[in-house]
Image: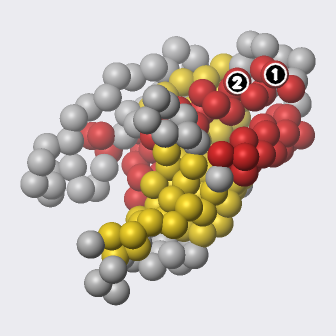
Amino acid sequence: MKNEKQIVTTKQFGIMIERLAHQLIENHKDFSETILVGVQPRGVEFTRRVLEKLTEVSENKEINSGSLDITFFRDDFGRRDAPIEAQELDMNASIEDKNVVLIDDVLFTGRSIRSALDALMSFGRPKQVELMVLIDRRLKRDLPIQPNYVGKTVESILSERVIVKWNSEDSEDEIILLKSENE
């Protein structure tokens, strides 16, 4: 049996996105040398939201972006019970000698980001790679990967899950922590 606790409300969610957009503007100025890359599947919606906010609050309306499928770069690719399905790829901009901001929703063990870095290198050699995450679950890192931009840090245990719910017909923007009642 599971129970859930809301850790980010809809209002807080919007504030986090706006703060992260302003941090990007501060560090990347006009974005002429920067590309935002969402890690599929869940980083793509986060990237879209950040781009919306950036075009709203900055002078630049033409920010390069793309999405990255890490399916075949995962270290658990052949080890799962159910096969992993590849996602549609959208990398129309070159990353060669660009500043890349990898964007994902939740950072936990670091393995997905390691896969994303491997996948990214197949598109060229970036000048610099930064990481933006909505939630940093910092207590269980398998790899030495740390984000440059963080919406919120959550200290959770292995049996807990962090779920990002995006605004849709069924729900509002929110982030919940699922706890196992057996713990």
> In percent of the image, x 43 and y 35: which residue is there?
170
Amino acid on which disc 1 is placed = Glu
Q: Which quadrant, please, contains the N terminus? A: bottom left
Residue bearing mark 2? 52
> In percent of the image, x 69 and y 26: which residue is there?
51
> In percent of the image, x 65 and y 46: which residue is there?
10
- Callouts 1 and 2 close, C-beta under 8 Å: yes
Q: CA distance from mark 1 to mark 2?
A: 6 Å
Amino acid on which disc 2 is placed = Glu
In the displayed structure, does residue 6 sit left or right of residue 87? right
User: In the rendered image, which quarter is residue 31 located in?
Assistant: top right
Q: Which quadrant, please, contains the C terminus? A: bottom left
Secondary structure of the residue carrying tag 1 is helix
89 over 182 or under it: above or below = above
Residue bearing mark 1? 56
Q: Nearer the viewer, residue 139 or 182?
A: 182
In the picture, the disc for residue 152 is none
Instruction: Residue 39 in the image: state x and y as whole percent.
Output: 48, 39
Instruction: Residue 95 in the image: state x and y as whole percent.
Output: 59, 27
User: In the rendered image, which quarter is residue 6 located in?
Assistant: bottom right
Secondary structure of the residue carrying tag 2 is helix
Instruction: Residue 40 in the image: state x and y as whole percent.
Output: 42, 36
How many residues crowd around disc 1 within 10 Å: few (fewer than 14), some, or many (20 or more)?
Answer: few
